[in-house]
Amino acid sequence: MNQKEAANSTFPRLLLQHGKTRPQHPAFREKDLGIWQTWNWQQVNAEVRALACGLAAQGFKRGMNLAIIGDNRPRLYWAMAAAQCLGGIPVPLYQDAPAADMAYVLENAEIVFAVVEDQEQVDKLLEIKQQYAGIQHITFDDDRGMRHYHQPELTSYAALQELGRAFDMTHPDFFMREVELGQPDDTAVMLYTSGTTGKPKGVCQSHRSFMTAAMGGMEFDELTADEDILSYLPMAWVGDHLFSFAQAMAAGFTVNCPESSETVLTDLREVGPTYYFAPPRVFENMLTTVMIRMEDAGSIKRKLFAHFMELARRVGSDILDGKAVSGMDRLQYALGNLLIYGPLKNVLGLSRVRVAYTAGAAIGPDLFRFYRSIGVNLKQLYGSTETCAYVCLQPDGKIKFDSVGEAAPGVEVKLAPNGEVLVRSDAMLTGYYKRPDATAEVMDEQGYFHTGDAGIFDQDGHLKIIDRAADVGKMNQGHIFAPNYIENKLKFFPFIKEAVAFGHERDTVCAFINIDMEAVGNWSERRGVAYSGYTDLAAKAETYQLILSCIEKVNADLASEDLMAGTQIHRFLVLHKELDPDDDELTRTRKVRRKFIAEKYAVLIEALYSDKRSQFIETLVKFEDGRQGKVSADLHISDVKTFSAQKLAA
């Protein structure tokens, strides 16, 4: 099926087609109790049909919304397909969101039916039901801990499918009739935005829009039914929906679901995906793990690693892109692949990866270069929830570390006079749910979506994203201030988990730092530095010296860049607590809520821009069980060495 034919189809029709054309091909795998279980496309067809008929028997109808909550599980993906078969709209929610956050989405989406993973999610919905009585049917997949739950709205997944099979027997034509009623322009899914600047909005995407994005990416990277992917990112995130649902349905490849979030890296090594997708945070964590292990390695191994990584940094990317490299360097790189790069990729589970993508936030050039230098074909993808994560792609052999590539096939990209990136294609939202006002704000009369990102085109037509347009500011001396650009450079270091830079309408740049507890803890233990927890470790003089050395390297790097030399960091502090989505400091996709942080920690920002050497703060925090507490500390403020751009160039 070509892109045009697919765009005129629906996901349920594709599902049925796979059941006929590749019935025995593995469609989904799930690891349970250490054992991988497999369902082929024929089995998936039967599972989805039974579930769809069960929902119909309970009263689920065309146009209704179905909430889906839990970790990546085959049955939850099948619930998405079942809703679509009936002309309904799946609404995946972030599974780690507290009940209060879920309540807004459930009420806004007018949810009556929900399919959830386990007892934890059932408890949240029963709590929400006390305020929002609209929820009438809750189906749970995992029955562990559910023995004493007798609420009338609860049904097990297995029982719902049994109900569906009985319904199918008495209404044999019902299922196919409902599937045939579906149209390409029907809403296929509703994904809520992360709510960086306000309440989350429901983004309505049609079958046609997601099919366009799925097929465009498949043809671009020559994806086939033989791909294996690991689905571990939140189902509510547009990236997971594109790769683990839309492209899986379009190509017919195999979706592998890990046992739990704790076993992802182990399961990644076992699956050995050929096609991999992760936000920069995951690649940062992988690199942190590598660096921690190298800290514990012997001196000979560390020297070998340093030598071959320097070689990889110099020629690895060129070899991957098929560019000219000297014979001696190729020979040395082959030796490095035998001793270092190959084993390293194997440990990370990336040995079989043919194409890897990162998106969701800008990836630091150094992090990007690291993976490509060891032979991982990592590429940046640029998109948003409103564009089905499909705007720009990087062609093989034309990878630039500071760009997100060229406009994807069928996508028009241009810049507004103020530098904002505007996008037009068939892979676009049909609108925000119940928010025509918000839709009008982002869609202009020519059909261009206003992304809110600031960008520039280079001489080869590659798009560079500078930052969120709303976040890009100016310093008092006239320098462009792009906080995300600076923060990504900081987060390349394994010891820095999160960073927030300040500098708009200021004379200098200052920063908050979150340390990576595992990396800094390992580093401290090797040096005999005792600590009692995060707050204590963050305040240690040794920790400050470690972070200071990292920031000075970033400043030296910034000094070598004409546009960024004036945005070097002058002062910093290490926060006494980790920035947390539960405390509203980050979105569920771990994007910084800058305005909220600036207001919450105003006293610390004021201290950074004064002559103070320390500042006391007491902060309210939320625990996972809903309780609240306070964390207080006297935070040290440290000055940082800056560099002259002229001297560095000389």
Image: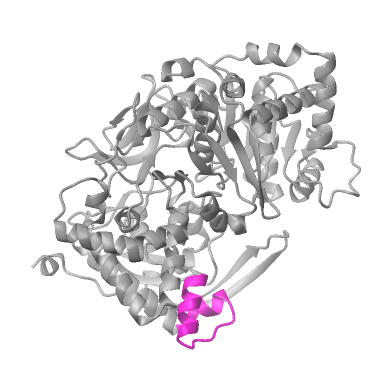
Q: Residue at x 16, y 38 (%)?
A: 459
Tell whether position 535 is magenta. Answer: yes
Query: Residue 115 at x, y = what percent?
Result: 73, 37
Q: Residue at x 34, y 71 (%)?
A: 550
Q: Which residues are magenta?
A: 517-540
Q: Nearer the viewer, residue 207 or 454?
A: 207
Q: Nearer the viewer, residue 342 or 357?
A: 342
Reply above or below: 244 against 183. below
Tell whether position 148 is magenta. Answer: no
Reply above or below: 462 against 525. above
User: Splitting the image into 4 quarters, where does residue 427 fall?
Assistant: top left
Q: Residue at x 34, y 36 (%)?
A: 393
User: Splitting the image into 4 quarters, where does residue 607 fall?
Assistant: bottom left
Q: Is residue 365 left or right of residue 599?
A: left
Instruction: For residue 605, say whether it is visible.
Output: no
Q: Nearer the viewer, residue 439 or 329?
A: 329
Reply above or below: 464 against 293. above
Q: Main secondary structure of the magenta part?
A: helix
Q: Is residue 631 left or right of residue 6?
A: right
Q: Is residue 97 left or right of residue 204?
A: right
Q: Nearer the viewer, residue 121 or 585?
A: 121
Instruction: For residue 339, say whether it is visible.
Output: yes
Name the residue at the left extreme. Answer: 650
Q: Residue at x 50, y 64 (%)?
A: 601
Query: Residue 151 at x, y = what percent?
Result: 89, 41
Query: Residue 8 at x, y = what percent?
Result: 49, 14
